[in-house]
Amino acid sequence: MRTTPLFRLTGAALFVASAALASLSAAAVAGAPAAGAASKLPACNLKALANHKGAVDITFWESASEANLTTLQSITNAFNSSQSQVHVTLVTQAGYDDTWQKYLAGLTNGQLPDAVQLEDQRTQAAIDTQSFLPVQSCMNAAKYSTSDYLPRPLAYWKVNGVQWALPFAVSAPILYYNQSAFTKAGLNAADPPTTLPQMVSDAKALKASGSGMGLVLDPWHLETWLASANQLFVNNSNGRSTRATAGAFDNKTAVSIFSQLKQLVTSGDATTNPSTGPDQYDNLLGIGSGKYGMTIETSAALGTVTQLLAGGQYANVKLGIGPFPVYSSSVQGGIEPGGSGVYISNKVPAIDQAASWEYLSYLCNTQSQATWAAGTGYIPVRKSSSQTATVQHLWATDPGYKVAYNEINNGVNSPATSGSVIGPYADVRTDVLNAEISMYTGGVSPSSAVKNAQSNVDSTISDYNSRLGTS
């Protein structure tokens, strides 16, 4: 998901990453089960905390900011006050990429947290560091039930039958649109596009009436449209049954997606902007200025957008929220989750691991997830959270907050809709982005762009796996 800029790591970070990953056991071969398969999980000694006298101090590296950080601090303060065994100190990083780079550096300098929040795209790379205790170990020790979790977010951080992290800050792409612009274009403001073809058609009508669509250059969207058509992005069940070794998207569905996007952009009905740098939010700002009538953006931005609109700065905007326009209404797929999971280090003493489990399970309990959702716009990952007074009031007063929840809770639960697990995920997305840009600005055909993207993705994954000694 687009929660933070998706750029390649700096040269220094790449050096650190290579050094850290090079230390992994070469015993893991391509196609073999990942280390820590369900049959040979390491222990999570919860009794170490139960038998301890006094408080255990742990650190949690997180990547929240502004309203999100305020909400996380509130939940953490409540946890610290609720008992006397564990005290959590939050260590705020500048963003997901910064957290990841500092974590990789910590593998060599020893400066590591007890628990950490990592972006979805780091899942396989995190596993490859062999530095985490799967939360599955603590779940087993605590006889912890996951039946109350939404299946898809839980499945995202479950690889080769092992739950590596608990889903925490989960989001999904949604449609933001100006109802006033829709009315002006002769469109039904209560009926935003629900499919990609309808989105292309509505963008044309919006453009003819003086606005159009803002389209951020984000390769995540290709993955989401594929998932909505129940199509894999990479092989081996999206990297979930065994390690991903190649792309799986060079097919008619991806070509159709790229063809429709190219039509949208080259016709002028949509204008693109980058997903990083000073122009990364032009698609959202364009809604406020009247330049655009609709855009696709993460649901995690909804709280900030709502807050800005409440200030009265954009009086011409009557915000509408719709679900992500799926590939086709006749194909049953689903929207993949995005966001971040929370992990426990295996580089710290057993008592710190037990303390970390107590905190992470608190972050993901019914009321904490309700508080988190209401304060941030993220999706409550528990079914029971959606029934709390906190969330029910939120959805009643602002139904737009329920859209992403419905997306993640509806549709088919499959490897395609659970999202991909890829070692060099950031670089893979760069490969797709470059192909997409070549189609918009270089005259490359959609079919060639898809073929080029998969070829480059195959090389990127192969190079990564080779560095680990897994291919």
Image (cartoon, grey):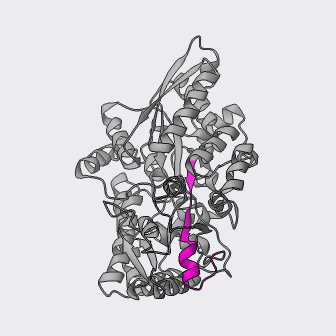
Q: Is residue 361 visible?
A: yes
Q: Quarter-wise, where is residue 83 in the image?
A: top right
Front residue (pair 463, 289): 289
Residue occupying image coordinates x 44% and y 31%: 347
Q: How many marks?
A: 0
Q: Is residue 226 visible?
A: no
Based on the picture, tell me whether residue 172 belongs to the magenta stretch: yes
Q: Is residue 37 above or below residue 238?
A: above
Q: Position of residue 118 (x, y in %)?
A: 47, 46
Q: Quarter-wise, where is residue 326 in the image?
A: bottom right
Residue occupying image coordinates x 59% and y 80%: 183
The residues colored magenta run 169-189
From the viewer's perspective, tell me whether residue 25 is left or right of residue 358.
left
Residue occupying image coordinates x 73% and y 41%: 145
Q: Position of residue 211 (x, y in %)?
A: 45, 80
Q: Is residue 255 above or below residue 374?
A: below
Based on the picture, tell me whether residue 442 belongs to the magenta stretch: no
Residue closest to the far left: 11
